[in-house]
Image: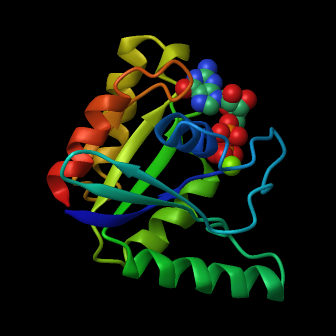
Amino acid sequence: KSGFISIIGRPNVGKSTFLNRVIGQKIAIMSDKPQTTRNKIQGVYTTDDSQMIFIDTPGIHKPKHKLGDFMMKTATNTLKEVDLILFMINAEEGFGRGDEFIIEKLKEIKTPIFLVINKIDRIHPDQLMLLIDQYKDLLEFTEVVPISALEGNNVDRLLEQIEKLL
Ligand code: GDP
Ligand code: MG
């Protein structure tokens, strides 16, 4: 089994941290500055009977200029072609304006989507339950998976769920 997995979400939600943890090396540029990752950087995670090819997809945000518009189209086309989308949010910030735009784009796409709620090490479990309720109404997610990319909580479970879907 093998498949392409695209990771999307607002800047600083922890996409690169997740990729680096899964792949086990610095394959994506980590920074607090938004949009440092300009290219589709791929990392491959291999188990006994599966191969997951991760793509760090930049450009899913409201375009401010022509170049942004072009990047947006490229990103949307990528999302149509992958086997799974990981839509990552920051548990601490919850749902924000940047996410509205991403969700509208995701509604046009048939690819399965996992909602990955990252940075759960920073919040109370009650807060997590509230977040899960909020997102359920916005889009049909195949799975909702809370993780901490930094500390590694539940990352193994997420990988198992990805493997099942491939
Ligand atoms: P990206 O812009 O989505 O690629 O986000 P990064 O991976 O660059 O992470 C942005 C910041 O969030 C960095 O300072 C990370 O150390 C931090 N971060 C990422 N994941 C977690 C997490 O699970 N918990 C906490 N507390 N911080 C995290
Ligand atoms: Mg990044």
Look at the picture and state if 131 lies above or below 82.
above
Q: Quadrant of the N terminus?
A: bottom left
Q: Please name whichever residue, 152 or 126, is drawn nearer the observer in this view of the structure.
A: 152
The count of marks equals: 0
Which is more toward the observer, 7 or 49? 49
Q: Is residue 103 found left or right of 96 in the rendered image?
A: left
Residue 62 appears in which quarter of the rendering?
bottom right
Q: Is residue 31 above or below residue 42?
A: above
Q: How is the image coloured?
A: rainbow
Residue 11 in view in this figure: no
Q: Position of residue 133 (x, y in %)?
A: 30, 36
Q: Quadrant of ligand 1?
A: top right
Q: Is residue 81 visible?
A: yes
Q: Quadrant of the C terminus?
A: bottom left
Q: Residue at x 54, y 36 (%)?
A: 24
Quadrant assignment, res 152: top left
Residue 61: x and y in percent read 66, 66
Give the side of residue 4 with respect to residue 24, left or right: left
Q: As drawn, which residue projects farthest toward the front?
A: 48
Residue 79, by quadrant, is bottom left
Identify the residue at horizontal 28%, vertical 77% (top origin). 110
Q: Position of residue 141 (x, y in %)?
A: 27, 54
Residue 34: x percent and y percent? 79, 50
Q: Residue at x 30, y 69 (%)?
A: 83
Residue at position x 37%, y 30% in the image: 155
